[in-house]
Amino acid sequence: MFTHRLVFPASVLRGRGAIKHLGAMCGRLGQRAMLVGGKRAIASVEAKVADQLEQQMVSYLGSEVFGGVCCQEEINRLADVFRTQGVEVIIATGGGKALDTAKAAGVKCNIPVVTLPSIAGTCSAVTSLAFRYHQDGEFRDMMPLPCGPTAAVIDADLLATAPLQWLSAGIGDTLAKWYEYRAISDLNQLTGLAGVARTNSELCYTLIEHFAADACFAVQDGKANNALEQVLDAIFLYAGLTSIMSNGAHTGASHALYEGFTACPKTRHVAHGLLVGYGNLCLLALENRSDEELLTAIALARASAVPTQLAHITPGLTEQDLAVIIDRSLSTPDMANMPGDITFEDVRRGIERVEMLGAKIN
């Protein structure tokens, strides 16, 4: 008999000033801690992390700069660093790729990982999944991990100081939880777990719809407010629970198009959630949703600084580039989750429709 295995983070600390509890959390896990993340992420949190560890008499072993791509080679490299340095607690900061790499390396070494996201780009801080890429940045697979983060520290004050594009990316990725799960789930055959995942995914949409605009203003001001906290809960908690409750089987055309975009050198550098956010609009077009519904979705994306046209992603995409992107998206397991067969012509027409309606709003 198949067992549905749910892997939750052991503890989540959320809200303004949550980082003030980081030291106590790490102190319960080990006495030798290392911070890993991108250069900018480390610079934004290192002083506070070091102070927190000092207060709890946990040895700070310094920081290790993440290489930029969550590939197996980087996972192996970080694992070797952790073993060599005798790390007992990993503190992972940055965005999804840095957190995923640290989580996977921690699993490889059997070392607890505390995630401290410095940007709100995805729900990676709480999930037991790692999006793996090839070394050149093209998407490889979504790798399930046997355990999730031991703790996640979601500090609204810290996240309010990140550039707006990263909150926009998180919003795009979180909206996909509803758009995709609605597209691939059968209301007549929902089990309890699938029903919970669907409910969480709809809550993600509702919170974004109500609070995204004010949350974006908070980030532009660099000061957390209630709207930002609501949106952060949607990005990390409710989107994360959707991923956990569905065991990762919640994705569709939005993520398939994202994977297609990573096959094109012109677009693979763009944040995951921004590309997924554009893919959401194409998904609605593939479902033959009405112009009115599409225009509403475009307006919400626009209010959240999510791309609504290809030119917003990168200028100068050619028909050949689009062919590569579409072909790659059609070969993904995510596109296979969609009901019915999706063809190249279907996706191309969907993109054309989104471009046309997006131009009307312009």
Image: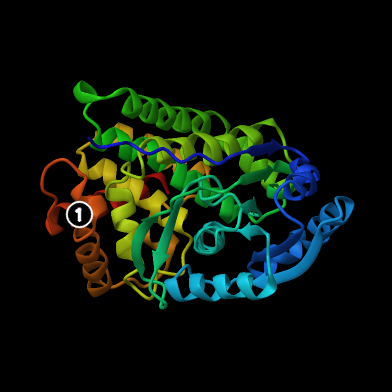
> Residue at image x 22%, y 51%?
335
| Picture layout, residue 111 above or below residue 297 | below
The answer to which quarter of the image holds residue 281 is top left
Question: Camera-side residue: 29 or 218?
Answer: 29
Residue 65, can we see it?
Answer: yes
Give the side of residue 335 with respect to residue 11, left or right: left
| Picture layout, residue 110 above or below residue 318 | above
Question: Camera-side residue: 236 or 153?
Answer: 153
Give the side of residue 216 with respect to residue 158, left or right: left
Give the side of residue 95 with respect to residue 178, left or right: right
Question: Camera-side residue: 204 or 31?
Answer: 31
Residue 357, can we see it?
Answer: no
> Residue at image x 89%, y 51%?
55
> What is the three-letter code of the residue carrying label 1?
Val
Q: How is the image coloured?
A: rainbow
Assign the N terminus to one quadrant of the image: top left
Residue 132 location in percent, x, y? 40, 64
> Residue at image x 39%, y 39%?
177
| Picture layout, residue 107 above or below residue 205 | below
Categorize mark 1 by other alpha carbons within 10 Å: few (<14), some (14-19), many (20+): many
| Picture layout, residue 273 above or below residue 7 | below
Count of numbered tags: 1
Residue picked out by circle 1: 347
Helix, strand or loop at disc 1?
A: helix
The answer to which quarter of the image holds residue 321 is bottom left
Residue 251 location in percent, x, y? 32, 45
Give the side of residue 347 with respect to residue 21, left or right: left
Question: Camera-side residue: 22 or 360?
Answer: 22
Residue 159 location in percent, x, y? 68, 48
Residue 133 location in percent, x, y? 40, 68
